[in-house]
Amino acid sequence: MRRCSSLLGTIDGLTEVVQQQRQLDEAPVEAVALQPFTEEVIRGLPQLPGQPEAEFTLDFAALPSLRLPRTALQSVLYNLLSNALKYAEPGRAPRIAVRTALVEGTPVLSVQDNGRGIDLKRYGGELFQLFRRFHPEVAGSGVGLYLVNRLVKQVGGRVEVDSVVGEGTTFRVFLPQ
């Protein structure tokens, strides 16, 4: 039975990837006001049982809006924020900061957390592989980061990651102008 549910999870993950890419191909690029958009994504995040309530800090002063397909931005933010919650350090309230910056003329959206972190020396080359997971004790499919990276690349951007095990992770999404 476990093998069957694993296969169904794999099929669901692949279906999600294909659907997201198809939607992105059809979605118009538009200026998305980040404050209300991000607040809406946060409201849609699942509250994990037994976990302290997360504290979110939003700072979009540098770039109050981004020009992207709305569906791509929603998927990127949802996956990064839900991962920040899912991979919170046990016993520590999740603190998540979402901000924008302009780095050498390039718009950057960052999501920083104080969670478990990822050993990038060990796993950095595998970070965006489909179905690759680094904390097997936490439920997940291994599709989220793959999808984030694919969507960002599809719009002409790139993703950079800094992480310290036990301290947290920062994802920086560099976007085309």
Image (cartoon, helix red, strand yellow):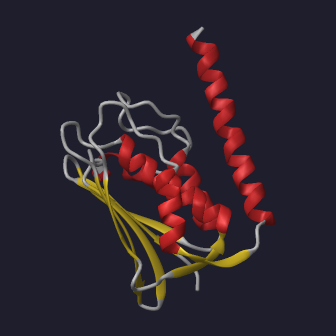
State the residue lying farthest toward the right: 26
Tell me which residue sits at (56%, 79%) in the image: 66
* Quadrant (top left, top right, bottom left, bottom right) of the N terminus: top right
Q: Position of residue 69 (x, y in %)?
A: 68, 70
User: Where 55 sits versus 131, above or below?
Assistant: below
Residue 126 visible in rendering: no
Q: Is residue 48 left or right of residue 77?
A: left
Tell me which residue sits at (66%, 67%) in the image: 70
Tell me which residue sits at (37%, 50%) in the image: 84
Camera-side residue of 168 and 122: 168
User: Where 56 sits versus 165, above or below?
Assistant: below
Q: How many marks?
A: 0
Q: Is residue 175 left or right of residue 101?
A: right
Residue 31 visible in rendering: yes
Q: Is residue 121 left or right of residue 2?
A: left
Tell me which residue sits at (37%, 52%) in the image: 124
